[in-house]
Image (cartoon, helix red, strand yellow):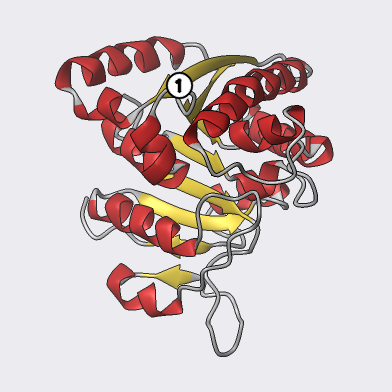
Amino acid sequence: MSTDLTIIKAGTGVLTKTSDGTIDRAALVHLVAAISGLIHSGQRCLFVSSGAVGSGVSALGLSEYPKDIGTRQACAAVGQARLMSTYSSLFSNFEITVAQILLTAEDIQNEGRAANLLTTFGRLLVDPRILPVINENDSVAIRELSFGDNDMLSVRVAKLLGAKRVILLTSVDGLLDPESKSLIPTVDDIDAVFRHVREDKGKFSMGGMSSKLEAVKFAVEAGIETHIANGRHPERLADILAGKGISTKFIPTSS
């Protein structure tokens, strides 16, 4: 698999409006344009997209995330279809075709399933104008829906594929110092930064900074360069890949 592969993950807070959980089309247009620019410049990317449950919430006439699993799964089923339809339309403007891949933790942990995944990804990545769009299969995976998140999914896929870097897009510029509120640009000791964690979950967001740092720890210990960056400014992605963008960069602890 490509050693120069970049996995970009966008969270629900980036993709949907905080007011009602509906898809923020303006934000998606901006993000799609930025990712398309990377692809056309020769960068191989995978896109991990949250937002299925959030986009399904409004379709079912709800005002917030439902507490029962069945309704969440229904939201995911409706929302995933809406989300992929939107991505297909937007990326087609840049002559890029999206490929949907829905995963559960078992798909990566099971040796046979993981081998099948590698085969699928390997074939998709042969064509530079195909962008795999990945999400958890939330409509059927009860355990993953309750306890998993796409931050960890992203880094697990990155390890499976031998990706070079992961960029976790969120609603802030990166990890902020709790006292000065300034951006921490580089972290070379992941264990030392957990004290900076602030739980700041949005109404339609499933994961906070704590879950992101758990995912980051998994990635850097697997030798994968990882960034937390602001998904509302996706134009920064090219600079981040060039080593000069605004983000918190976590240095791999192994190679």
Residue at the (31%, 29%) spot, across then down:
161
Mark 1 crowdedness (10 Å alpha carbons): few <14, some 14-19, many ≥20 = some
Amino acid type, callout 1: Leu
Which quarter of the rendered picture does the N terminus lie within? top left
Q: Is residue 19 above or below residue 248?
A: above
Left or right, residue 180 beside residue 253: right
12, 160: nearer the viewer: 12
Q: Is residue 142 above or below residue 200?
A: above
Residue at the (49%, 29%) spot, across then down:
135
User: Mark 1 falls on what kind of element?
Assistant: strand
Residue 24: x, y in percent? 79, 39
Residue 180: x, y in percent? 59, 89
Q: Is residue 214 above or below residue 234?
A: below
Left or right, residue 129 beside residue 121: right
Left or right, residue 73 beside residue 231: left
| Residue 148 visible somewhere in the drawing | no
Instruction: Single out the residue that lies furthest toward the right.
Output: 26
Residue 225: x, y in percent? 38, 52
**Which corner quadrant of the image does residue 57 belong to?**
top right
Q: Which residue is mark 1?
A: 102
Residue at the (58%, 21%) spot, across then down:
77
Residue 193: x, y in percent? 38, 75
